[in-house]
Amino acid sequence: MNQFYKLGEGVEPEAYLLAVAGDKNFVYNYRPVKIELLASELCEIVPEIETTESINQLAHTLANEVHPDFYAINHLKHGVVYLHGKLPDLVKEYLEFKYKSLPELRYVVANSVILEGMNLPLDTLFIFNTYSLYGKELMNLIGRVNRLNTIFGQGENRLLRLLPKVHFINNEEHYRPNSKMENKIALLRSRVFDDLVKNPTLAAFDIEALKIPAASKEKYVEKIKSIQENEEFLVSRLATKEEEIRAYLIQSGIIEFYSDPAEIITRFDRVSSSLKNSPTDSWALATMMEKIEYVFLQEIETVSDFEVNRLTFPEARSYYENHILITQKKALNANVNALVQYFKERATTEDSKLYFGQSYGEEPRVTEAYPHFSNNVYVDLSNKTERELVNLAVVKLKMEDDFVGFKINKFILMLYDYDLINKEEYNRYIYGTNDERKIQLTKYGLSVSMIARLEENGQLDNLEFDEFNNLRATPAFEKYLLTINDFFRFEIRRYIG
């Protein structure tokens, strides 16, 4: 009816949450670091649950496979798990699976990452933040509660679950001060929401309908025009090599790393021609990160992507060279331990600030390259406890994997497509090997670290592809699965039924 009724005053959010919680509760927040904070706060008010063998086993597995100081382990004592996109994919999916299957786990604190993938048996939703949630997004979020498979076919009358229990909690700790959720709640009065066309290549696109703040509108308009020009360019006839290079940059997404593509087009054309005509020993001996820096970053002043621009520094190139060739082959716990040790060493130097992006960044770091950079994207490692360093290492590994997968690998592919590196180099950096069978397994979805672990255990010969290119296991492999822990078995079962 578009009216609000005050049901009570002076109620603490924590007491309210405990009073109305269901069997399976989804506690929604927006930013990953705030999700971890909210999960910790939830554990302070939710009593410890009765310890079971399943929870003990899960805690033991996470301690062995991730780290004993991983925040999620202590949360299990209270029946709480947290999920967000900065957790390593395997850890996130494993916790999702455990939350779904273990009744002892009653609370999951997460953001929209939970909207993707499996249906969880949720019956109650608590919304602590409505940032970026509009009509459709709110309906989609609410739609995660009481999925039809939890209502029907359960052998009992659960029709009341057709009315999902949704609670908006306007807590200033997790929401902007002086902001109210009433406006977002009012959006739910309508079941019909207008489409907001954000794709600038569509005829229906109207920039005025987006209601962009005046302070950022000019920059946004420039980006929109660039996208439209690039789309029009791709359907035009390519007459020169420069135009061919520009088309490749657009299709690969590399063009997004530069404020003006003219410089990179000119340099790539000149450098690639020179290297093909007169290959040098220095180029042959250079590491992949050095090759990327030389071709895509050197003598270019229009690199606008802050992450990519870090490769202009030797320390960053060495770091990612190691990450691609060594780190990705190791188990998660070994990588966490190694990164924590690196953090400790870095914390004792004058350069104790490390890039973590806007998801976890706490302060800016002004440099000569970015004299006006004010975004909080750095964390000062010198003022963190060891437990905090461990959990920063967990999310940092995921960030680095994303950076390599979504940005660095694009450069490597372009070098290969233009014959600036050979197939052996390409395979070593993309797949971690030149073994065709291992490459086939990687293309199927198995991680480089999983393949290395299976090889170490002598199990690769017990896997084979059938005539339909599905991966199958021998009876000996099934016996092997009984000897490994639940975490590794879960990882394998994602690909081998």
Image (cartoon, helix red, strand yellow):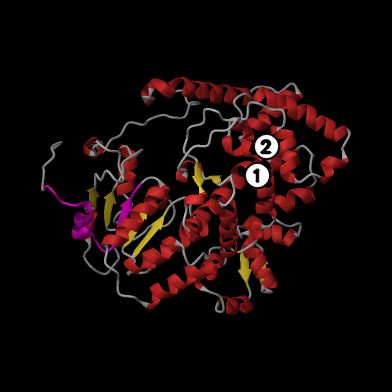
**Which residue is at a point 56% across and 64% down the rendered structure image?**
333
- Magenta stretch in the rendered image: 9-29
Which SS class for mark 2? Answer: helix
In the shown orientation, is residue 78 left or right of residue 329?
A: left
Gap in angstroms between the C-alphas marked 1 and 2 = 8 Å
Is residue 24 highlighted in magenta?
Answer: yes
Residue indicated by mark 1 = 316
Image quarter in which the C terminus is found: bottom right
Residue indicated by mark 2 = 312
Q: Determine whether 299 is above or below 406 in the image.
A: above
Q: Nearer the viewer, residue 157 or 344?
A: 344
Give residue 208's position: percent from left, percent from top: 38, 20
Cβ–Cβ below 8 Å for labels 1 and 2?
yes
What kind of residue is marked 1?
A: Ala
What kind of residue is marked 2?
A: Thr
Residue 38 - label: none
Q: Residues within 10 Å of mark 1 (few under 14, many from 20)?
A: some
Is residue 193 highlighted in magenta?
Answer: no
In the shown orientation, is residue 491 left or right of residue 252?
A: left
**Which residue is at a point 38% across and 61% down the rendered structure image?**
81
Q: Determine whether 95 is above or below 373 in the image.
A: below
Give residue 234's position: percent from left, percent from top: 63, 26
Give residue 71's position: percent from left, percent from top: 42, 61
